[in-house]
């Protein structure tokens, strides 16, 4: 494998960008925060990346200790990529970057791809300080987040793997407003733009806030 390119600057920010500054790397981290993913699933949820570039970035991430590759036991029998502890430590970096970039979102452009689970990290920011399994239903599909998760995946595509502590139903426009920072979750619930069901503590907290 060729050596990693470097800014050759004795600065921690420069060193960090040596590792994660290439195009697509942080978006791959975003996808792997959902847990182990097959190459084909990653490619499907990263529209615009070529197969060569994706393979190259994954090799770089393995080399730099951000991700590992392993083979699932039968009947899965497929190779999956997953984050190491070092890779998972990039969650607050992505959260800060997402918050910084929310003013850049604006209205969705005709050329913009979208996946329901791309709203997971913004929602986790809005749920900071709370704990529980939350399922979210949008027009584009479902996803779930593990608010306050200490280890393991912080979100996942599709329905919650167990009975959620809260179920949120909202339209895409409301979800986009939350993602842009134009609306907070408590206000959205109060105004009836987010329907909250469930008997868990988190659901009750959101309804009564």
Image: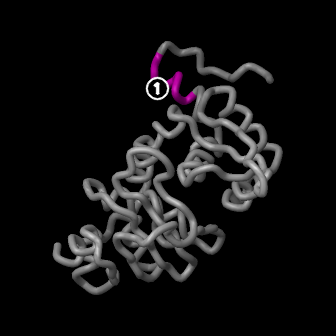
Query: Can residue 112 be seen from the camera position used here?
Result: yes
- Residue in the image at 44% along x and 52% along y: 98
Instruction: Let me know if residue 171 is in the magenta part.
Output: no
Instruction: Let me know if residue 15 is in the magenta part.
Output: yes
Above-or-below relation of 47 to 139: above
Which sits in the foreground, 79 or 100?
Answer: 79
- Magenta stretch secondary structure, dominant: helix
Query: Can residue 103 be seen from the camera position used here?
Result: no
Judging by the rendered image, the residue that carries numbered circle 1 is 13
For label 1, count other residues whose C-alpha is less than 10 Å away and answer few (under 14), some (14-19) or many (20+): few
Residue 113 rendering spot, x and y as whole percentages = 63, 67
Above-or-below relation of 131 to 24: below
Residue 118 rendering spot, x and y as whole percentages = 53, 62
Q: Residue furthest right?
A: 52
Quarter of the image holding residue 130? bottom left
Quarter of the image holding residue 136? bottom left
Q: How is the image coloured?
A: one colour
Say how many tags the image has: 1
Check the picture and name the quadrant holding the C terminus.
bottom left
Taking the image as shown, residue 126 lies to the left or right of residue 20, namely left
Q: Residue furthest left?
A: 209
User: Tag 1, which secondary structure?
Assistant: helix
- Residue in the image at 44% along x and 44% along y: 151
Which sits in the foreground, 19 or 87?
Answer: 87
- Residue in the image at 59% along x and 33% along y: 66
Question: Which contiguous range is marked in magenta?
Answer: 11-17
Check the picture and name the quadrant holding the N terminus.
top right
Which sits in the foreground, 43 or 200?
Answer: 200
Taking the image as shown, residue 115 lies to the left or right of residue 191, namely right
């Amino acid at each position: 494998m060729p050596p990693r390119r470097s800014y050759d600057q004795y600065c921690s920010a420069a060193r960090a960008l040596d590792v994660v500054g290439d195009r697509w790397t942080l978006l791959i981290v975003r996808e792997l925060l959902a847990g182990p993913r097959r190459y084909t699933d990653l490619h499907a949820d990263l529209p615009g990346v070529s197969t060569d570039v994706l393979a190259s970035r994954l090799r770089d991430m393995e080399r730099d200790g951000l991700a590992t590759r392993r083979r699932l036991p039968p009947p899965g029998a497929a190779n999956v990529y997953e984050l190491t502890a070092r890779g998972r430590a990039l969650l607050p970096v992505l959260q800060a970057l997402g918050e910084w970039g929310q003013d850049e979102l604006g209205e969705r452009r005709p050329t913009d791809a979208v996946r329901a689970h791309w709203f997971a990290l913004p929602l986790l920011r809005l749920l900071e300080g709370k704990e529980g399994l939350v399922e979210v239903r949008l027009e584009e599909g479902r996803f779930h987040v593990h608010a306050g998760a200490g280890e393991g995946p912080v979100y996942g595509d599709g329905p919650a793997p167990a009975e959620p502590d809260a179920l949120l139903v909202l339209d895409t426009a409301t979800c986009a407003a939350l993602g842009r920072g134009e609306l907070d979750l408590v206000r959205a619930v109060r105004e009836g733009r987010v329907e909250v069901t469930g008997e868990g503590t988190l659901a009750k907290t959101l309804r009564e806030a």
